[in-house]
Image: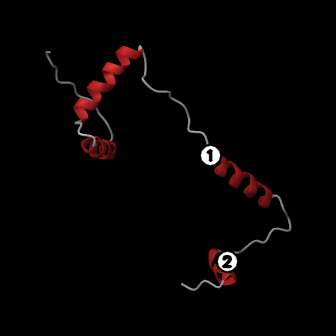
Amino acid sequence: METVATNIRIDKQLKEQSSQVLEGLGLSLSGAINMFLRQVILQDGLPFKVEYPKPSRSLKKAIKEGEKLINDPKAKTYKNFQELLDEMGIKE
């Protein structure tokens, strides 16, 4: 199999983090990219779904609770974080 050199530009941190993960799997970045491209050919497209992540049930519940508190005029509020800590009896 003949190989060719290809230059791509990627974020430095993205390369470092992904290379570290791939190394743990016994793969080089080049090997992983080759694997990806082979899957693109086999799948005739991207080998995974591309979509926005969906919030978990617990996150949806927390958002709903937060919205309820924002709209509740009787909800306890604090002027700053320290005031909340003081009420909870937490000392820094």
The amino acid pointed to by label 1 is Ser
Label 2 – label 1 distance at C-alpha = 28 Å
| Residue 64 point in image, percent of width and height | 74, 52
Which residue position holds label 2?
A: 84
Residue 56's tag is 1
Rendered residue at 67%/77% (across/down):
84
Q: Quadrant of residue 46?
A: top left
In primary-sequence order, the first of circles 2 and 1 is 1
The chosen color scheme is: secondary structure
Q: Is residue 62 left or right of residue 35?
A: right
| Residue 55 point in image, percent of width and height | 62, 44
Crowding at label 1, few (<14), some or many (≥20) Cα neighbours within 10 Å?
few
Q: Quadrant of residue 3?
A: top left
Q: Secondary structure at mark 1?
A: loop
Q: Secondary structure at mark 2?
A: helix
Q: Is residue 6 left or right of residue 84?
A: left
Asked whether the beta carbons under mark 2 and mark 1 sit within 8 Å of each other, the answer is no
Q: Which quarter of the rendering shows the N terminus? A: top left
Rendered residue at 50%/27% (across/down):
49
> Is residue 85 or residue 60 the one in the foreground?
60
| Residue 91 point in image, percent of width and height | 57, 86
Tell me if residue 30 comes above or below residue 76 in the rendering: above
Q: Which quarter of the rendering shows the C terminus? A: bottom right
Q: Is residue 76 left or right of residue 60?
A: right
Rendered residue at 75%/56% (across/down):
65
